[in-house]
């Protein structure tokens, strides 16, 4: 069979005709397989959802318990048959619960990566490369300019700045699912043991991470309820949008920081009024994307959401067949 | 190299002056010689390295990677130095155990000849990580553009050594990179460096604005008054055949004014205002003067059209005699005699303004006889010449600012304390025929309002946003809706860069006119009339 008979794009998302299911559909469908809990990949309203238990839990936290008609938890590495199509989930290293989805039928195996990264991350299981015929890779940072530095160096810069400016507070913008918890965990691993202050939008997800055995230390709400709390010298973590909002006015002369792979580009930091960019990404950088493509041994690469053209060009230079897969509806929520 | 690279990255994104000072002082404290001195020289523009052209940089990188991938990258990033620093291919395992220091990088670049410059640069880039590569490329392409003036760097040195910045300025032109003796003194490990160089800058004396009630306490008989000329403050120093013109912060600006420097046939230090024109005939306006400012080189035509001259108001030194401890009255006497000996086409004397009481002076201040006069200066007859801004001996009493009623058009989020406030405002006035009026932007202001007013404007901006572009919001502003701001400014210049054709000097918000309908704001013709005056 041809690869495009096993999986191909439809307006709702990536569709598998023999198995009658979609991967990360952007509209409500009958049967959805979901790679991870970011809202552009995991939407509510499907009749049935198959995902890892942690992804199901996260969807429940975000959308309420009735986010889908029925749910089924996929165990990592376990093969599930859907109308004769073998499906299995494998860790993607993106955020807690994230998985690649392998779809196999009549000797043809396609792996959809979802979003992934290769760096060590104490808040989720590491990516496992899966041999396959076709590898569908994300390309969020699919340009040779994206080379993420070690995350420990970035956290060291944050701590250095906190020591340099002890009268000011540091506001770290980080997306609520994954990045925020990773930043908190990195701070703990670097020996920072003071309480971390968090925006309300992070509370439930952070609590869930802690319940899954990921120690984030003492987290305090960044509220001013108890009179005039003093945030002098504090590190505050919140969603990036909150820092442009009136919410941020409670902090003394804040230094705005943003933990994201986009911070690699100075102009991005400048435009966003970011004083201390922290290049911490939950996506593979250019070198990881190209190395992963080689590791999967795939003869054909489909490139989706991101800067497809550069990665397709690289594959051409390497003699690997590649084409962009024009899927719509995926934003960069995860970074 | 990494510490220097990190410093550059932090400085460029840190908007507050105090934040920049903290970063610089920390750097001077933690980095050893000669790296800290070389970094200082790079920031103040005193580091000389043979330049590498952007085209050469592009060639070096496309020899090493696919030009198509480089093209995609450059299109995305938009900045050549940054793109090259990011995409430069790094062979794993080829990176040396330690990255080169700033001192090693500068030494290699300075030793490179023109022909092997690109090769030396490439090998340096091979040996460095991303941040260090960016810093190296910035060094060789010239112009760090990190928003730190030489003046701010000197202030950081003063903070670091807990000395007055005037001491640094006075020493500065006798020193050279990597400033080892300077740092040793600032750290208390050695005596203050001795100045042996000729024609050095003397830190200037500055004035305080006249505040409410200041004059009532003063006796007019104790003070002399002069016009306050709206040129640039300049210090002319000639000694031992060396001639220098310094700005008020001690930057050497002689190169931009060779016509004036050539006329300095004396051995003395003069303080005065740099203006254009011929002092015997006519003094040029500020727009004329602007033609001569911020230029690296100046054509003979420019020198002929807008000749520079100096209107002298103080004399600090003649030959070996330091006059600064004398009274203003005595110095003025010496100055009057001295100016007579100079080229009258290039030097004249700042005239006194005669007055008997403050009211007379007030009337004169309000109606000065020349457009380039921006007020009056008051100087105590018995005051010595003291560096800095002592309170009492010198006052500036400026003409009242112009005001215009303009409509708020765009608002941009501020930084630091103001990062959650829309605090930078672009405003416009009406232009076009009746019935087809349009707002045309005439300026931008980010101070002049109280904290309470800031909150009110911020709320107005959030409630009346039409469009967003990153940190900027476009605010509803038409004939029937809009917030009128009374904007005060010191003067207007013609501008080819702005659509309105005018550029304001020192604009600030003087009042919020919640009461005034947008269609009653001023028209562009009101401003144009000011230009033609």
Image: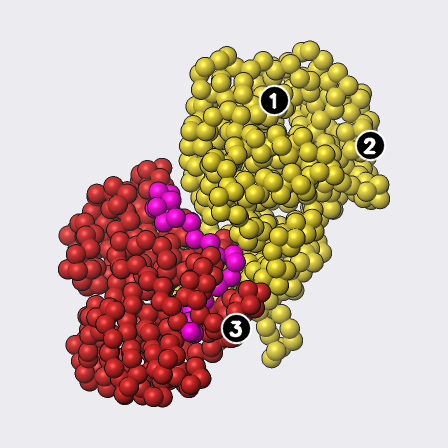
Chain colours: A red, B yellow
Q: Give the Cα distance between marks 2 and 1.
A: 34 Å
Label 3 near label 2: C-beta < 8 Å? no
- The quadrant holding residue B377 is top right
The answer to whether marks 2 and 3 sit on the same chain is: no
Task: Write down the residue under mark 1.
Answer: B175
Horizontal side of A241 relative to B140 (left or right) equals left
Residue A319 in the image: state x and y as whole percent: 55, 68
Residue at the image position 41 percent from the left and 52 percent from the top: A279
Horizontal side of B372 relative to A117 (left or right) equals right
Task: Write down the residue under mark 2.
Answer: B345
Label disc, if present, on residue B368 of the rendered structure: none
Residue B158 in the image: state x and y as whole percent: 48, 26
Q: Quadrant of the C terminus of chain B?
A: bottom right
- Element on which disc 1 rests: loop
Task: Write down the residue under mark 3.
Answer: A321
Residue A119 in the image: state x and y as whole percent: 36, 54
Q: Is residue A305 above or below residue B181?
A: below
Q: Is residue A229 above or below residue B218?
A: below
The answer to whether marks 2 and 1 sit on the same chain is: yes
Horizontal side of B90 relative to B316 (left or right) equals left
Magenta highlight range: A133-158
Q: Is residue B439 magenta?
A: no
């Amino acid at each position: 069979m041809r690869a495009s008979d096993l999986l191909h794009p439809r307006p709702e998302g990536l569709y598998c005709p023999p198995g009658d299911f979609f991967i990360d559909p952007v509209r409500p469908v009958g049967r959805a397989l979901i790679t991870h809990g970011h809202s552009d990949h995991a939407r509510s309203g499907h009749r049935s959802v198959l995902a890892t238990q942690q992804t199901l839990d996260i969807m429940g936290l975000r959308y309420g318990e009735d986010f889908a008609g029925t749910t089924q938890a996929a165990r990592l590495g376990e093969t599930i048959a859907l109308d004769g199509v073998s499906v299995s989930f494998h860790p993607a290293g993106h955020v807690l619960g994230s998985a690649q989805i392998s779809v196999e039928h009549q000797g043809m195996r396609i792996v959809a990566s979802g979003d992934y990264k290769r760096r060590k991350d104490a808040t989720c299981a590491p990516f496992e490369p899966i041999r396959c015929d076709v590898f569908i890779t994300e390309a969020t940072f699919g340009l040779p300019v994206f080379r993420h530095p070690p995350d420990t160096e970035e956290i060291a810069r944050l701590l250095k700045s906190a020591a340099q400016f002890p009268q000011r507070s540091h506001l770290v913008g980080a997306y609520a699912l994954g990045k925020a918890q990773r930043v908190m965990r990195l701070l703990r691993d670097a020996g920072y043991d003071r309480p971390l202050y968090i925006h309300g939008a992070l509370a439930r997800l952070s609590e869930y991470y802690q319940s899954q055995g990921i120690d984030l230390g003492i987290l305090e709400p960044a509220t001013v309820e108890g009179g005039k709390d003093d945030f002098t010298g504090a590190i505050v973590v919140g969603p990036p949008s909150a820092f442009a909002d009136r919410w941020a006015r409670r902090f003394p002369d804040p230094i705005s920081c943003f933990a994201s792979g986009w911070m690699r580009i100075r102009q991005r930091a400048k435009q966003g009024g970011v004083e201390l960019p922290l290049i911490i990404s939950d996506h593979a950088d250019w070198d990881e994307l190209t190395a992963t493509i080689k590791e999967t041994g795939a003869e054909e690469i489909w490139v989706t959401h991101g800067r497809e053209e550069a990665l397709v060009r690289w594959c051409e230079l390497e003699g690997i067949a590649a084409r962009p897969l024009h899927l719509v509806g995926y934003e960069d929520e995860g970074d | 190299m990494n510490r220097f690279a990190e410093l550059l990255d932090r400085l460029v994104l840190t908007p507050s002056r105090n934040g920049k000072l903290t970063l610089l002082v920390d750097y001077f404290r933690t980095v050893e010689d000669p790296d800290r001195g070389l970094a200082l020289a790079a920031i103040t523009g005193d580091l000389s390295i043979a330049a590498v052209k952007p085209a050469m940089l592009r060639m070096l990188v496309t020899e090493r990677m696919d030009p198509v991938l480089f093209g995609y990258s450059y299109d995305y990033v938009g900045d050549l130095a940054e793109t090259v620093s990011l995409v430069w291919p790094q062979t794993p395992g080829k990176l040396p155990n330690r990255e080169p220091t700033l001192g090693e990088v500068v030494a290699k670049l300075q030793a490179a000849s023109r022909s092997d410059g690109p090769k030396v640069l490439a090998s340096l880039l091979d040996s460095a990580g991303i941040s260090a590569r960016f810093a190296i490329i910035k060094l060789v392409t010239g112009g760090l553009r990190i928003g730190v003036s030489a003046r701010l760097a000197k202030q950081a040195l003063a903070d670091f050594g807990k000395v007055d910045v005037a001491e640094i300025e006075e020493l500065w032109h006798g020193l050279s990179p990597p400033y080892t003796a300077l740092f040793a003194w600032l750290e208390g490990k050695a005596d203050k460096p001795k100045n042996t160089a000729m024609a050095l800058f003397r830190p200037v004396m500055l004035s305080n604005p006249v505040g409410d009630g200041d004059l009532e306490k003063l006796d007019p008989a104790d003070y002399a008054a002069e016009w306050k000329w709206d040129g640039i403050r300049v210090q002319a120093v000639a000694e031992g055949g060396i001639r220098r013109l310094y700005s008020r912060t001690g930057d050497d600006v002689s190169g931009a004014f060779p016509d004036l420097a050539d006329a300095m046939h004396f051995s003395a230090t003069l303080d005065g205002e740099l203006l254009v024109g011929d002092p015997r005939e006519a003094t040029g306006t500020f727009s004329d003067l602007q033609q001569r400012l911020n230029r690296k080189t100046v054509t003979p035509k420019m020198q002929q059209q807008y000749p520079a001259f100096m209107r002298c108001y103080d004399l600090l030194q003649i030959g070996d005699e330091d006059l600064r401890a004398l009274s203003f009255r005595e110095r003025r006497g010496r100055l009057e005699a001295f100016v007579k000996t100079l080229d009258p086409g290039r030097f004249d004397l700042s005239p006194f303004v005669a007055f008997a009481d403050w009211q007379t002076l007030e009337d004169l201040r309000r109606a000065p006889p020349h457009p380039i006069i921006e007020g009056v200066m008051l100087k105590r007859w018995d005051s010595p010449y003291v560096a800095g801004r002592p309170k009492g001996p010198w006052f500036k009493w400026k003409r009242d600012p112009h005001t215009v009623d303009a409509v708020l058009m765009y608002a941009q989020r501020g930084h630091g304390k103001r990062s959650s406030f829309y605090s930078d405002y672009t405003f416009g006035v009406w232009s076009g025929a009746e019935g087809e009026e349009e707002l045309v932007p005439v300026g931008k202001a980010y101070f002049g309002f109280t904290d309470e007013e800031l909150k009110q404007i911020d709320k107005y901006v959030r409630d009346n946003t039409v469009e967003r572009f990153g940190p900027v919001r476009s605010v509803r502003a038409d004939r029937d809706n809009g917030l009128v701001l009374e904007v005060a400014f010191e003067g207007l210049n013609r501008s080819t860069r702005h659509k309105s054709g005018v550029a304001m000097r020192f604009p600030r918000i003087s009042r919020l006119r919640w009461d005034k309908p947008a269609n009653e704001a001023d028209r562009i013709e009101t401003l144009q009339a000011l230009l033609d005056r």
